[in-house]
Image (cartoon, helix red, strand yellow):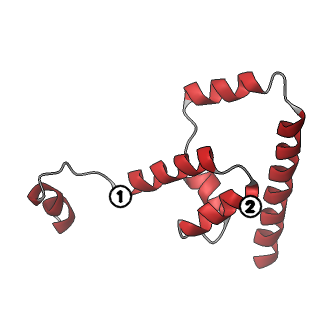
Amino acid sequence: MSKKPEAFTNAGLPYFNPHSLRNTLVRLGETVCQTPEAFKAWSQNLGHEKVLTTFCSYGEVSTRRQQEIIECLRSPTRSAEADFEKIAKAVAQELRKSIAEV
């Protein structure tokens, strides 16, 4: 047995994968970050150089939440459209950086 599970057992705690904490932090960031810039800062705080790492590797959207989001998209508000444009621009910028680094 490795030392990590022993540490949990010795502390009287059940073992959990360390990435489960990161997943939780990404989900929280998805909720509290209101702009692409805020999410980029959140991503950097998690130690990710690229926000796409955070988007692609963590924080899977639950089926229930996915349904809620899609339902809200039926009648987008003007601010939601503006947010979409900001997110699209931020993702495009990150993709350009990634391609330039290759």
| Residue 14 pos. (x, y %) | 19, 48
Question: Vertical placement of 67 versus 12: above or below?
Answer: above
Q: Quadrant of residue 101?
A: bottom right
Residue at 45 percent of width and 56 percent of height: 22
Task: Give the residue number, with chain letter if any, for mark 2.
Answer: 37
Residue type beneath disc 1: Pro
Residue 10 is left or right of residue 19, and the answer is: left
Residue at 49 percent of width and 53 percent of height: 25
Residue 81 seen in the current view: yes
Q: Quadrant of residue 80?
A: top right
Task: Give the residue number, with chain letter if any, for mark 1.
Answer: 18
Residue type beneath disc 2: Glu
Q: Nearer the viewer, mark 1 or mark 2?
A: 2
Q: Quadrant of residue 5?
A: bottom left
| Residue 37 pos. (x, y %) | 74, 61
| Quadrant, the C terminus | bottom right
Question: Vertical placement of 78 versus 43: above or below?
Answer: above
